Image (cartoon, rainbow, N blue to C red):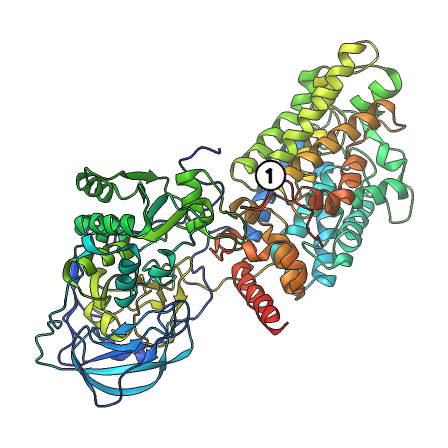
């Protein structure tokens, strides 16, 4: 049970990756308009640098990092700043965004730029280059990557874990990145190892991607300790804490960071992105996105300019089927349903999953019958049944005492609940309420 | 349709203009769910009881069907009248009625069985707030009520008559009248024989069900199979019956080793009385059993110990019902002390709050 090949509990939703796992990444043509929200990462939103009417070249900064836990935002296409206004944001809010009218006949070649010579750079300088390029975690959380590269001096880090698990159903973004750009991943690893000063790297990949495992193994460097660890296919295998448990056998202490057990975890897409920075000098202006699901006519893996609107992406993928009812950014387990086709795909958008009436159906809710399925699904061993009862009564302090803050909102409890109680939704609300009270106090 | 829209396959919508007409569904993640549902669990339990009822009818004739139907009708009507709108569809009231009927003697008057069903659902479940809120197993509470109200009727056991069609007692006794003397000869159950006369019954008879006893309790082997089906389909927690049966086997086995003449054999203990039905169907009621995996073991071991204690040293021949009801009352406490250790927390942590 406690072997090192997987973690305890978790669920097995249908993988449904066959739609796109063999489909090569295609570059999407530039849309007419690009929408770049200033808030695309965890931390403080970027500070605006341009004004309406400005001409920007592809790769130019349109907003600057505001502090350390922040990254700049670059124009993903050449054009003119048409407007700066509130636009729909993938998190459901309206966010201040730069709207760029893309120049129709521009060759869209980024300005020639200086490629940072990584061999000569100090770790501190590498971290600066990573921040300058606007790199965030491309696995969905969009945490600025460079922040993780600077552990405090008293916290020794010995292992870099590259997260290629991609445990969300449907998505093949990381899968295709590993199959098609393994050299870039290996190059990114080399730079990260130098920046972090670690001497061991483990790439974790779920076993349902044998081609990715093979490609990564073919391209492993001879002079570094890098290995590929095939992982059991189980959700949420790609959750940071679960992955660390599998690779190192250690649990990240409650409320602590991975570096407290000597580990830094980076998404494989972010690693490839870093490889690209030190290869071509391009900042993060485009990313691989899986557009898939039974509701989309031509499921594809696309290289999409950051800020492309959902409408344009769906149009490029042949439109929706008759019975499409729901569009999700990210995977179906943790992703957010989108109400507006004008919402842009941002740095942290791992995929677009279009579900039909068959999958996304409203179900009747029943009282909790204490069946215990949620306890046996929860990867952090909480008691969702109890937490749900407390949430319904609004007893947030009791939820805190029952370790609500350890919940990572993976959705396993909601997935298995036979009474269809929206547990993880209630827990998200509870965590927000507790955070608000903390800041108010 | 816009001119530059990409070409698509045959028919249907070809671009997104028509999307403005469809309403996009918004919901919180996760957007996928298992096909499980609470009614599906409940109706599966009901389905797994049908073979048991069929075999009971084979042994006890039409009386078995009549008594079970009366109890089920009582439970269903109560849920229908006093329960929330539509709550009969979840199947839980039918389970309560069926289970109550199966633990009554075949010659039981129908009106009493009906009252038992009403009491079980009304005072065993609805008064607490309906499905999921009750502390005690409603079927067992119904039976406990009947045992208190009609102590002699509920311990009248018929022997097998020659005619299958013959009623096994005064099933049609009028309400509030005491039932007439049964037409069939009465006999004792294997547990009664053991308790008061020290006579054992062959294990094969106990396993197959050709003995005197409550309607659905006699065919131990069949109950094991039906319950096993539910366990494999994960409609019941296997830990509960496993721990009950193991505890009874070990405890009574130890007693048997000490004094084979004094104490019944473990196989007699396992297959007599209501133990099988209780372990598989009563104790595993999800609402009234612990929610934590470790709690399920504690709960089952407690039931096993209490059952043997009552059977061997108590004043009653059978102890499963009171053992389960007693452990039901302890479930909130068991849940509290068996909270799993949360990921990333030290091995021994102070006990968290509990509802």
Q: Is residue B83 above or below residue B238?
A: below
Which of these two is toward me, A234 or A306? A306
Q: Of all residues shown, which one is farthest toward the bottom?
A: A53
Q: Is residue B236 above or below residue A115?
A: above
The residue labelled by disc 1 is B237
Q: Which image quadrant is residue A75 in?
A: bottom left
Which of these two is toward me, A271 or A30? A271
Q: Is residue A318 above or below residue A149?
A: below
Left or right relative to B217: residue A196? left
Asked whether the viewer can see residue B38, the reply is yes
Q: Position of residue B61 (x, y in %)?
A: 70, 33
Q: Position of residue A283 (x, y in %)?
A: 22, 66
Residue at left offset 73%, top offset 41%:
B101
Q: Position of residue A207 (x, y in %)?
A: 31, 40
Q: Position of residue B150 (x, y in %)?
A: 89, 41
Report the chain holding disc 1. Answer: B
Left or right relative to B142: residue A373? left
Label 1 packing within 10 angstroms: few (<14), some (14-19), many (20+): many
Asked whether the viewer can see residue A389, the reply is no
């Amino acid at each position: 049970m406690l072997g090192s090949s997987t973690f305890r509990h978790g669920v097995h939703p249908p993988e449904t990756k066959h739609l796109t796992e063999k489909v090569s990444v295609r570059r999407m043509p530039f849309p007419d308009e690009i929408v770049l929200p200033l808030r695309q990462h965890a931390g403080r939103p970027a500070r605006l640098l341009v004004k309406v009417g400005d001409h920007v070249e592809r790769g130019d900064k349109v907003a600057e990092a505001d502090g350390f836990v922040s990254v700049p935002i670059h124009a993903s296409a050449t054009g003119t700043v048409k407007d700066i206004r509130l636009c729909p944001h993938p998190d459901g809010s309206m966010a201040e965004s730069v709207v760029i009218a893309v120049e129709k006949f521009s060759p869209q070649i980024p300005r020639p730029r200086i490629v940072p010579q990584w061999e000569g750079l100090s770790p501190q300088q590498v971290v600066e280059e990573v921040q300058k390029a606007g790199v965030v975690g491309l696995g969905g959380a969009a945490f600025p990557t460079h922040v993780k590269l600077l552990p405090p001096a008293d916290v020794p880090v010995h292992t870099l874990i590259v997260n290629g698990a991609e445990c969300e159903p449907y998505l093949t973004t990381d899968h295709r990145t590993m199959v098609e750009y393994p050299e870039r991943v290996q190059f990114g690893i080399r730079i990260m190892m130098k920046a972090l000063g670690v001497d061991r790297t483990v790439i974790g990949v779920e076993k349902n991607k044998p081609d990715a495992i093979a490609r990564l193994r073919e391209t492993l460097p001879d002079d570094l300790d890098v290995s590929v660890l095939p992982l059991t296919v189980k959700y949420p295998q790609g959750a940071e804490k679960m992955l660390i448990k599998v690779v190192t056998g250690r649990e990240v202490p409650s409320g602590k960071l991975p570096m407290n057990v000597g580990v830094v975890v980076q998404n494989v897409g972010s690693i490839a992105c870093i490889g690209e920075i030190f290869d071509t000098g391009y900042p993060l202006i485009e990313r691989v996105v899986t557009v898939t699901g039974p509701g989309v006519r031509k499921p594809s893996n696309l290289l999409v300019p950051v800020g492309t609107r959902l409408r344009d992406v769906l149009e490029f993928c042949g439109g929706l089927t008759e019975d499409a009812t729901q569009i999700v950014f990210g995977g179906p387990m943790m992703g957010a349903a989108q109400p507006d086709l004008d919402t842009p795909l941002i740095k942290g958008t791992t995929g677009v999953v279009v579900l039909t009436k068959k999958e996304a159906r409203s179900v009747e809710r029943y009282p909790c019958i204490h069946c215990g399925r949620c306890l046996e699904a929860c990867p952090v061993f909480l008691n969702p049944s109890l937490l749900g009862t407390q949430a319904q009564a609004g007893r947030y302090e009791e939820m805190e005492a029952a370790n609500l803050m350890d919940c990572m909102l993976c959705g396993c409890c909601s997935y298995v609940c036979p009474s269809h109680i929206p547990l993880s939704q209630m827990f998200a609300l509870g965590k927000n309420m507790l955070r608000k009270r903390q800041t108010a106090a | 349709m816009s001119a530059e829209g990409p070409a698509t396959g045959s028919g249907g919508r070809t671009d997104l203009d028509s999307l403005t007409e469809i309403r996009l569904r918004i919901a919180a993640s996760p957007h996928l769910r298992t096909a499980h549902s609470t009614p599906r669990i409940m109706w599966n339990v009901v389905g797994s009881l049908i073979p048991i009822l069929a075999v009971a009818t084979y042994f006890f004739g039409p009386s078995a069907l009549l008594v079970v139907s009366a109890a089920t009708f009582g439970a269903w009507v109560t849920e229908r009248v006093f329960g929330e709108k539509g709550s009969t569809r979840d199947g839980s009231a039918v389970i309560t009625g069926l289970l109550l009927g199966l633990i009554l003697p075949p010659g039981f008057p129908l009106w009493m069985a009906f009252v038992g069903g009403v009491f079980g659902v009304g005072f065993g479940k609805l008064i607490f707030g309906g499905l999921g809120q009750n502390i005690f197993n409603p079927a067992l509470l119904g039976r406990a009520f009947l045992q208190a109200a009609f102590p002699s009727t509920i311990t009248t056991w018929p022997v097998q008559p020659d005619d299958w069609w013959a009623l096994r007692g005064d099933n049609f006794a009028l309400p509030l009248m005491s039932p007439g003397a049964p037409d069939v000869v009465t006999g004792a159950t294997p547990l009664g024989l053991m308790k008061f006369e020290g006579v054992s019954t062959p294990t094969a008879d106990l396993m197959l069900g050709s003995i005197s006893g409550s309607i659905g309790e006699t065919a131990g082997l069949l109950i094991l199979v039906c319950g096993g089906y539910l366990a494999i389909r994960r409609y019941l927690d296997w830990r509960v019956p496993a721990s009950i049966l193991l505890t009874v086997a070990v405890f009574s086995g130890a007693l048997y080793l000490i004094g084979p003449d004094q104490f019944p054999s473990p196989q007699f203990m396992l297959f007599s009385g209501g133990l099988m039905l209780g372990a598989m169907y009563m104790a595993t009621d999800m609402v009234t059993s612990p929610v934590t995996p470790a709690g399920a073991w504690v709960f089952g071991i407690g039931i096993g110990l209490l059952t043997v204690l009552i059977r061997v040293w108590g004043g009653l021949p059978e102890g499963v019902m009171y053992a389960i009801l007693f452990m039901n009352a302890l479930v909130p406490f068991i849940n509290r002390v068996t909270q799993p250790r949360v990921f990333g927390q030290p091995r021994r942590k102070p006990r968290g709050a509990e509802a």
